[in-house]
Amino acid sequence: MLNANSPIPLYHQLKSYLQDLILQGVLKPGERIPTEKELEERFRISRTTVRQAIGDLINEGLLVRVHGKGTFVAQPRIQQHLGLLTSFTQDMEAHRRTPSSRVLQFETCPATPQVARALQLKVGEQVILLKRVRLADEQPLALETAHLPAEPFRALLDLDMRQRSLYATLKAHFGVEPRRALQQMEAVACPAEEARHLQVSRGSPILHIYRTTFDQSDKPFEFVESYYRSDRFFFTMEIWSK
Ligand code: 16G
């Protein structure tokens, strides 16, 4: 199957072969791929060649290595369009995943300078803090800490936010809908507490996002700090020339 006389390096041929098996669904998400030794013997190639091909596929996010267990086909990542203002629930439903949340904190607290600036409040004014681990099919994908002005949203605190969409609830109970958002995104090394909630290794790359969302009257109604698993999401956007 691999051709030693081809100008295409052997590691690249093996990589393309494995890539095709994954993209065609022959190797399924979560399935263990053959060991380095098995690939070496099957294709009569060196261990270095096998390692190079597998290493590339790990770096590209198609495979994941689990220490002591082997190398597995990665779960397909969720595509998020950066030009569309959607909720976590809508994103998951679009990918036929079942969303849920683990509520870590849901209470009022005084606005910090950062929160006050984003929500156009005074420092120390009461805000609702809602900290949730966001899951899809029971798997943690993101950690979100939302702040909303306590007035007019105080009645939110009586609701169980484990199975609810915040945006759908704001619309149903308060007539508030997101119209635009300012979003900032950076890659960081995952801090310890966030790593524990998201079941990733501490220090692994993660997306740190800030979003301020504005309603129909262009009033900011939420300021959210999120950590999104970079092994579970990728982002697309449409860009235009000047
Ligand atoms: C998204 C938003 C977050 C919003 C949440 C509402 C990002 C980075 N964040 O996750 O700001 O609070 O959706 O989701 O996209 P929900 O309506 O499902 O609760």
Image: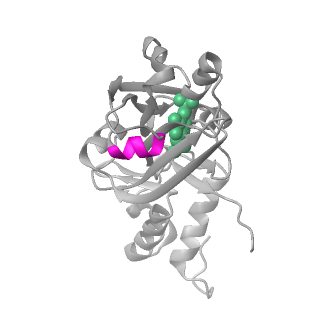
Q: Is residue 116 magenta?
A: yes
Who is closer to the viewer here, 134 or 121?
A: 121
Which residues fall within the magenta stretch? Answer: 113-119
Residue at left offset 48%, top offset 17%:
156
Q: Quadrant of residue 194?
A: top left
Q: Is residue 179 magenta?
A: no
Farthest residue, direction right: 241
Who is closer to the viewer here, 209 or 35?
A: 209
Q: From this viewpoint, is residue 27 visible?
A: yes
Q: From this viewpoint, is residue 161 visible?
A: no
Which quarter of the rendered picture does the C terminus lie within?
bottom right
Farthest residue, direction front: 122
Residue at left offset 47%, top offset 69%:
56
Farthest residue, direction left: 192
Who is closer to the viewer here, 216 or 75?
A: 216
- Give how far across and how far down residue 157 sits, in percent: 43, 16
Residue at left offset 53%, top offset 49%:
233
Which quarter of the rendered picture does the N terminus lie within?
bottom right
Residue at left offset 35%, top offset 36%:
111
Question: In this rendering, is residue 44 above or below 29?
Answer: below
- Give how far across and how far down residue 5 sits, in percent: 61, 87
Who is closer to the viewer here, 75 or 23?
A: 75
